[in-house]
Image (cartoon, rainbow, N blue to C red):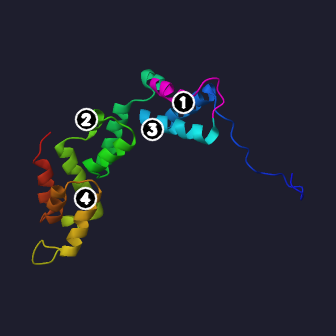
Amino acid sequence: MNPQGVPDRRKRPPKPLDPARMEDMALAYVARFATSAGKLAAYLARKLRERGWDGPAPPDVDGLVARFVRAGYVDDAGYARGKAQGLLRRGYGARRIEQALGHAGIAEDVRAEARGSERDRRHAALVMARKRRFGPWGGDREAEGPKIDPARRERQVAALLRAGHPLAYARRLVDEPSIEAAEEWVDEILD
């Protein structure tokens, strides 16, 4: 209590982790979030920095993560597929997918499998262009032809590049004369 008689609401420092608490914390994390081995290891390392360690031996984060992988609680390939497909559906390109999976600690061979097909990547570019009203979806074309303001075109191309799409895809979609032509460009690649 403070001098005014009001209970003191300061937080107590959290208890240091021991092997049982660390395992419980890891179980709660994988139960709540789809995660990769790298993200789980980073989470546990952060919690160890924040709370400290009170175990009989040094903490074995790598051993705990390896046990979770063997038990099937953590699946890097499944995480990579799910994350990549979610980003593709939202319109992001291969470069952004590569960055997200690399940040999650996914191995290169697993990242390569998760990138999606050529058609998937083209469709993602089309989704982004449609969502952001780029190219033929913009409605800002001049009456005499499909040309748009060069500065606006460059901003649209730049936005598609930031979303992770190749320059060729960005230019192609922004310069398409019609929505049908853009959809045909995607459909010309068969899975």
Label for residue 27?
1
Callout 4 crowding tier (Cα within 10 Å): few <14, some 14–19, many ≥20: many
Callout 2 crowding tier (Cα within 10 Å): few <14, some 14–19, many ≥20: few
Say which element carries label 2: helix
Q: Look at the picture and state if 136 lies above or below 94.
A: below
**Which of the marked residues, 3 or 2, is nearer the chain's N terminus?**
3
**Structural distance between the alpha carbons of marks 3 and 2:** 19 Å
Question: Can you identify the residue that label 4 sits on?
Answer: 161
Question: In the shown orientation, is residue 53 left or right of residue 3?
Answer: left
Question: Can you identify the residue that label 2 sits on?
Answer: 113
Q: Look at the picture and state if 162 lies above or below 145.
A: above
Q: Is residue 28 visible?
A: yes
**Residue 46 appears at what percent x and percent y?**
54, 41
In the image shown, does 138 or 93 lie closer to the viewer?
Answer: 93
Say which element carries label 1: helix
**Which of the marked residues, 1 or 3, is nearer the chain's N terminus?**
1
Quarter of the image where one finds residue 3: bottom right
Q: Amino acid at mark 3?
A: Lys
Say which element carries label 4: helix
Callout 1 crowding tier (Cα within 10 Å): few <14, some 14–19, many ≥20: some
Question: In the shown orientation, is residue 143 left or right of residue 55?
Answer: left
Q: Nearer the viewer, mark 3 or mark 2?
A: 3
Quarter of the image where one finds residue 182: bottom left
Q: Amino acid at mark 2?
A: Glu
